[in-house]
Image (cartoon, rainbow, N blue to C red):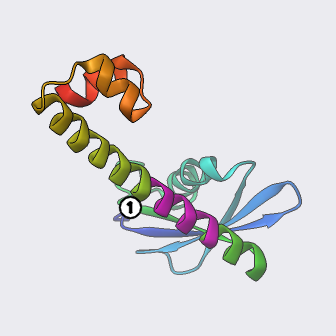
């Protein structure tokens, strides 16, 4: 049997993730379980190899789709968005700090003065100016 791309729907069941595997070449869903979500892909690949004779190198992509209840799904989405926004703000702050440190250096200020003005260690200023 040729391999292909597979989707693994993961739902909590007791202390386990119940996994439903669907995809190319499967005429019906296959089921297995994993203790942790990070184990779901390996368990799906093992299931495909054992029960459908699809070797692990024949399996293309395995997409894991966790399913939580609606309030938790929304909370996870809000948390991920907040973290992405925080990362963008951090990256913007780093870029702004780098530009300001360079301008201060171009004005002839010493790295230790720049570090005091920007509230950074002199090592951090040195790294910013080198990057």
**Residue at image location 51% in from the left, 81% down from the top:** 27
The part of the chain drawn in magenta is 78-87
- 8 vs 76, nearest the viewer: 76
Residue 38 lies left or right of residue 91; in this view the side is: right
Q: How many marks?
A: 1
Q: Which quadrant of the rendered structure holds the N terminus?
A: bottom left
Whether residue 20 is visible, yes or no, is no
Observer-nearest of 77 and 43: 77
* Viewer-closest of 62 and 48: 62
Up/down of 90 relative to 18, above or below: above
Residue 120 figure quarter: top left
Say which of 128 and 39 sits in front: 128
Please, is residue 17 above or below residue 70 in the view? above
Q: Is residue 82 in the magenta section?
A: yes
At 89% across and 60% down in the image, what residue appears? 14
Residue 58 relative to residue 63: left or right: left
Mark 1 surroundings: few (<14), some (14-19) or many (≥20) residues within 10 A = few
Residue 60 image point, x, y percent: 35, 60
**Residue at figure coordinates x 16%, y 39% from the top left:** 103
Residue 16 vs 103, above or below: the answer is below
In this image, 7 relative to 88: left or right?
right
The residue indicated by pointer 1 is: 61
Left or right: 34 as drawn, with respect to 113: right
Dominant SS of magenta comes to helix
Q: Position of residue 130 (x, y in %)?
A: 18, 25
Q: Position of residue 99 (x, y in %)?
A: 21, 43
Q: Position of residue 48 (x, y in %)?
A: 52, 58
């Amino acid at each position: 049997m040729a391999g292909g791309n597979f989707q693994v729907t993961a739902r909590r069941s007791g202390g386990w993730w119940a996994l439903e595997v669907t995809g190319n070449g499967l005429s019906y869903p296959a089921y297995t379980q994993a203790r942790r979500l990070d184990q779901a892909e390996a368990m799906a690949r093992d299931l495909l190899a054992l029960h459908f004779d699809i070797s692990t190198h024949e399996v293309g992509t395995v997409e894991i789709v966790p399913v939580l209840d609606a309030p938790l799904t929304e909370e996870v989405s809000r948390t991920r968005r907040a973290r992405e926004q925080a990362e963008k703000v951090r990256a913007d702050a780093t870029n702004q700090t780098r530009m300001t440190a360079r301008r201060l250096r171009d004005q002839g200020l010493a790295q230790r003065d720049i570090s005091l003005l920007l509230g950074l260690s002199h090592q951090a200023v040195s790294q910013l100016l080198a990057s």
